[in-house]
Amino acid sequence: MADTIESRLARVERELAILKAKAASDKSDWIAEITGSFKDDSDFEEIVRLGKELRDAELPTED
């Protein structure tokens, strides 16, 4: 027999509570974790340089 709407909703609410609790406990400072991970990486420096080159090329010219 199929679950009732009420039982399905109760299951969803329980699972949502579990996910919320897990998300609250998993808070980490992800920026601190990745800061410096590309230090001295020549490929990343090239990516940054090319990105700046593209942005600068899209600037409007002054008359």
Image (cartoon, helix red, strand yellow):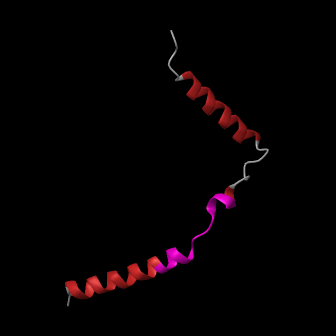
Q: What is the x, y in percent for residue 53? A: 62, 26
Query: Which quarter of the picture shows residue 52?
Result: top right
Please report the residue visible at 68 percent of the width from the left and 61 percent of the height from the top.
Answer: 33
Report the number of numbered marks: 0
Single out the residue that lies furthest toward the front. Answer: 63
Single out the residue that lies furthest toward the bottom. Answer: 1
Q: What is the x, y in percent for residue 44? A: 70, 41
Q: Is 15 left or right of 54, judged from the image as shown?
A: left
Single out the residue that lies furthest toward the top. Answer: 63
Q: Quadrant of the N terminus?
A: bottom left
How would you classify the magenta stretch by its main secondary structure?
A: helix
Q: Is 13 left or right of 29, judged from the image as shown?
A: left
The one nearer the camera, 45 or 30, is 30
Start and end of the magenta stretch?
Answer: 21-33
* Camera sees residue 31: yes
Q: Is 30 left or right of 13, judged from the image as shown?
A: right
Whether residue 41 is situated above or below residue 59 in the rendered picture: below
Residue 29 is inside the magenta segment: yes
Please report the residue visible at 52 percent of the width from the left and 13 percent of the height from the top.
Answer: 62
Whether residue 7 is situated above or below residue 32 in the rendered picture: below
Whether residue 51 is situated above or below residue 3 in the rendered picture: above
Residue 27 is inside the magenta segment: yes
Please report the residue visible at 74 percent of the width from the left and 52 percent of the height from the top.
Answer: 36
* Camera sees residue 3: no
Q: What is the x, y in percent for residue 22? A: 51, 78
Q: What is the x, y in percent for residue 25? A: 56, 77
